[in-house]
Image (cartoon, rainbow, N blue to C red):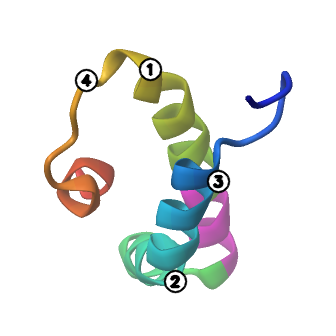
């Protein structure tokens, strides 16, 4: 069981694997590595908040990129 504020293992593992690809995408979209990091952090926070209500996510990469 996760304590409050602790990131669940599957979430951590999934985002750990996809993070470099997501960061490149965000940096390309913003034109800046630094701004891309900011956008990525905001996107990951929103994804983490939405995860409990998302149901079964068949394509996590597609879900994160939309």
Q: Nearer the viewer, residue 19 or 32?
A: 19
* Pointer 2 residue: 20
Sequence order check, earlier mark of 1 and 2? 2
Left or right? Give the position of 50 relative to 6.
left
**The disc label shown at residue 55, or none:** 4
Towards the viewer: 43 or 4: 4
Of labels 1 and 2, the one closer to you = 1
- Alpha carbon separation for disc pair 4 and 3: 22 Å
Cα gap from disc 2 to disc 3, whole angstroms = 12 Å
Question: Circle 3 sits in a helix, a strand or a loop, which is it?
Answer: helix
Q: Is residue 12 magenta?
A: no
The magenta stretch spans which residues? 34-40
Give the number of the mark in front: 2 or 3. Answer: 2
Image location (x, y in percent) of residue 8: 65, 42
Query: Closer to the observer: label 2 or label 4?
Result: 4
Q: Report x, y in % for residue 45.
A: 61, 39
At horizontal 43% and vertical 72% (from top left) the residue drawn is: 22
| Between discs 1 and 3, the one toward the N terminus | 3
Q: Measured along the vertical axis of the image, is residue 46 above or below residue 11?
A: above
Numbered disc in front, either 1 or 3: 1
Query: Which residue does the image show at 63% across and 52% down from the upper left?
Result: 9
Work out whether mark 4 precedes mark 3 in sequence or the reverse, and give the earlier one. Answer: 3
Nearer-N-terminus badge (2/3): 2
Which mark identifies residue 13?
none
Whether 36 is among the magenta residues is yes
Q: Which numbered dot is residue 52?
A: 1
């Amino acid at each position: 069981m996760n304590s409050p504020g602790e990131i669940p293992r599957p979430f951590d593992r999934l985002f750990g694997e996809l993070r470099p690809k997501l960061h490149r995408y965000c940096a390309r979209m913003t034109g800046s590595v630094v701004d891309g990091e900011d956008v990525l952090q905001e996107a990951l926070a929103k994804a983490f908040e939405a995860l409990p209500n998302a149901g079964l996510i068949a394509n996590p990469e597609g879900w994160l990129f939309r």
